[in-house]
Structure formats: C-alpha cells, structure tokens
Image (spheres, rainbow, N blue to C red):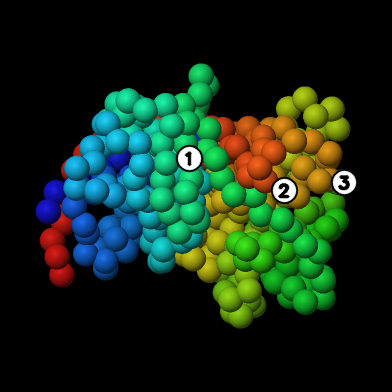
Amino acid sequence: MKLPIFIADAFTARAFRGNPAAVCLLENKLDEDVHQKIAREMNLSETAFVRKLQPTDDFTQSSCFGLRWFTPASEVPLCGHATLASAAVLFYKIKNVNSTLTFVTLSGELKARRAEDGIVLDLPLYPTFPQDFHEIEALIKAAIGDTMVQDIQYSPDTRKLLVRLSDSYNRSFLETLKVNTETLLQVENTGKVKGLILTLKGEPDGQTYDFYSRYFAPWVGVAEDPVTGSAHTVLSSYWSQQLGKKNMRAFQCSRRGGDLDISLRADGRVDVRGSAAIVLEGTLTAWRG
C-alpha cells in the first residue's frame, strides 16, 4: 500500500514555523486501525486523512472531500491547522481547480477558500461560560503554579478550559512561562477537560495583536500544540466579547509561533485566515498488521 503524504507548516508563511501537520490523500478506504498507526508513525500533533467521498471523485477536480484528524494517541473531532494544511496541499500541490473546498468532518462541514494572502477556514464558533475557580484550582496550580489569573472560562462543546492570565503580564511572560503538563493527567482525569488554553490580552494600542495564547492537550497526547485552530474557535468567542471586536489578529506564543486573522461572521461562525508552507512531499509505504 502506497499513500501520497505531505507535511505542511500551518499558520505561517515560512518553513519550520507554525504548526506542522501530515496530510495523507486516500484514493481508497483505509483499514480503521491504520489511521492511528500512521499518525503514531508521523508523531506530529495531527495527521490529516483526506478521502474521496465517491469513487468518481478526483483530488484535482472535485470540491468536497471527507476529512479526519488523528493525534499520535487518538482521533479528534476538530483540528484547524491540519484542515489548513489539507487545503494547502490540495490547492498548491495537487492544483485543485476550485476556489472553495468543503470537508465533511466530525464537526460538520468545514470550508476552506482561497484568499490573496492565504487560506480562509470557515469554522464553528464555541461560546464559553464562567468556571468556578475552586472546582479546577488543583489543575491550574499544577499547570502554572502561582501565576495570577484574571478570568476562567469553560467551553462545554470542546471541553477546553480557558485561563486568562492577569493583564499585568506581557507577551514575553506568556512565552517563557514554564507549564507543567506531566501531572495534568493525574490532576484531571474526569474527562471534563481535554485542552488547556492560556491567554493574555494584547498590547494596549491594539496595533500588533489583540490577544495571545498557548495551548496544552496532554489528554489527547499533545503536551503543547504550536498553533491551534480549534482553540481559536473558543478564543475568538471569548475575546470578541471582551474587546467588543469582530475582527481580530492573534498570535500563538509557542516556540514555533503562528499568526491568525479572525473575523466573526453574521451566521455565528468564524473565519480564520492563515498561510501554510509545504515542507515535505513523499510516499508512505505501509503494510497491514
């Protein structure tokens, strides 16, 4: 069995920054367990599998495909950066002729459209609700110690916990903050939390970025994710309310770093725009069993 495979760095225009995702193009159905084996072999935060929905579909001509995402440990219901990477492979490498692609996923239909300066993802927007500090105090203390916290919100749709750090901190503080992810699985094992977002308000002038973030998901096998589209389906909702803005620019402060341009839509969804750099193209040879 030979599969075309690519690695694309998402939410960046430069190679070796942003968030790398592997993208597999499936001409035929893959044995169910092989998806996870390939994702484990790739050992990136996400491996995306783009599949034809009909035997007559064509990766160059068709505009609608199935899409699944796997971490090295499990399948996930939504991954923004691997969706961006998948669209980039189809647009830039396979030379898909369409201006908009539709992906059928566990999170419904997601669209990716060409833009002058990148690719725009049409993603769900998930509301957050205030979270009682005492219920998750042990989790926060384990992750960030005595770091001052300004607000705590929870997204039940995504099971992500959003922790806003004090406005007295700046970007460099968030970038250098040591986060202990090793003990989080022991502290939180109820299944309520699947991802931890740390976020910080941007500069007062709003000229550079409206907000910053980092994202941790050891519960799905990803200690820290470099740039996370799914986290911004939650961050966009929160910061739009906090800042009173529909259009925002965000930066995820991982070691690799990534830029996201955000526009809340009238239909209750969110457009997330980013670039992608394809850094590897090859063939995966796999055996059953």
Q: Tell me which amino acid carries mark 2.
A: Ser
Left or right of 103? Residue 214 is right
Viewer can see residue 10: no
Q: Residues within 10 Å of mark 1 (few under 14, many from 20)?
A: many
The structure residue drawn at horizontal position 59% and vertical position 58%, both measured from the top left corner, is 216
Circle on res. 111? 1
- Give the image location of residue 205, x and y in percent: 84, 27
Amino acid type for the residue under numbered disc 1 = Lys
> Based on the displayed image, in which of its 4 quarters is residue 61 positioned?
top left
Please state if 78 lies on the left or on the right of 236 as rendered: left
Q: CA distance from mark 2 to mark 3?
A: 22 Å
Residue 153 visible? The answer is yes
Query: How far is the residue under mark 3 from the one under mark 1?
Result: 38 Å
Q: Secondary structure at mark 3?
A: loop
Query: Mark 2 sits on what residue?
Result: 237
Query: Pointer 2 and pointer 1: residues touching (CB < 8 Å)?
Result: no
